[in-house]
Image (spheres, rainbow, N blue to C red):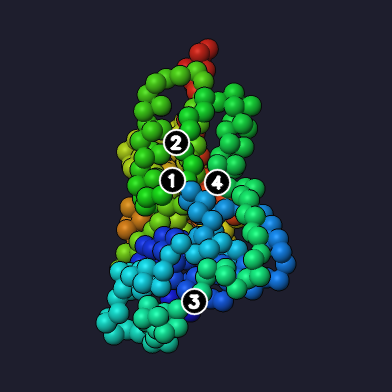
Amino acid sequence: MSPSVTQSLMQSGATIGDINTVRKRLSRIKGGGLAQAARAGRMVTLIISDVIDDPLDIIASGPTVRDQGTSQDAVAVLERYLGRDSGDRVVPESVWRVLDQQVTGSRERDLSFANSNTVTCLNRVIGNNLTALNAAADEARRLGLDVRILGANRGGTAREVGIELAERCLVARDEQRSEGVCFLGGGEPVVKLAVTNRPRRGGRNQEVSLAAGVRWAGENIERCAVLSAGTDGEDGPTDAAGACFDANVQQAADDRQLSPSEFLAINDSYTFFEQTKGLFKTGPTHTNVMDLQIALVAGIRKDSGQS
């Protein structure tokens, strides 16, 4: 599939499931194509999932899994997000032509595995978002924190996720507990880009943390912090895995007279965190099980009343 089509779908708020629905119909390998072409009698696929709820036909576009979608589904995705008659030619005419031929049956792919020499495909998920979330929870408990699991495989928009984390932290802050609290969530929220001519950089995880910071405007967050990061070490087209918003970042923004809400309004989270030292950089990890969100509220020391 054309990189411009993929990028346009992402910018329009399409999920990875939507994107891969199109990809599978434009590839000889994806959507069961690899299994169909295999000559072995048995194929074992070990899968690391980077998709919410681990649908086997969506992860990596399911090269060894029978496609559960149709060419009409792919057409519907493109029409819903990009439009057929927009006139901007974001979707090349050749893509429409191939999909239309598949829909009419004149060029439909045979994904029944009937011609695959009866290959037996064994597909096993060996790592996913829940794996990472459970590991983070184990470490947080080891550190003596009160762990509150928000769930793995969560979607929604990055801004909604950030606001939720910020509000949970405020509630926990007001509990005045001696024990620190750790909220943990995982998944892959989406970002719908605002219309602007101004330059911008960022990713969904940086937007989660920035949205939390915007929610915290005017609040005392000395004991609070939100970190959202991609487990692959990459967040959008940037060199950061994500970002952290805490009292230090808030103070740096105040010192530089930066308005978090203005940066959030145009999805320019990277620029904000670059100036306030909030970027979280790990480098590529070469393993992707989506994102983790970690929100911390430090406890109150009984002897001094301080965190």
Residue drawn at the location 52% of the way across and 45% of the way down = 292
Above/below status of 38 relative to 89? above
Instruction: Report if the CB atoms under discs 4 and 2 are less than 8 Å apart.
Output: no
Residue 90 in sight here: no
Task: Looking at the picture, tell me which residue is in the foreground, 166 or 277.
Answer: 166
What distance separates the C-alpha of mark 2 from that of mark 1?
Answer: 9 Å
Above/below status of 109 relative to 120? below
Label 4 sits on residue: 129
Helix, strand or loop at disc 2? strand
Q: Percent x, y for residue 157?
A: 37, 52
Above/below status of 116 relative to 105? above
Q: Percent x, y for residue 299?
A: 50, 23
Label 2 sits on residue: 150
Instruction: Report if the CB atoms under discs 3 and 1 are less than 8 Å apart.
Output: no
**Is residue 142 rendered to the left or right of residue 301?**
right
Q: Amino acid at mark 1?
A: Arg
What distance separates the C-alpha of mark 4 from that of mark 2?
Answer: 13 Å
Q: Residues within 10 Å of mark 2 (few under 14, many from 20)?
A: some
What distance separates the C-alpha of mark 2 from that of mark 3?
Answer: 41 Å
Label disc, if present, on residue 154 of the rendered structure: 1
Q: Amino acid at mark 4?
A: Asn
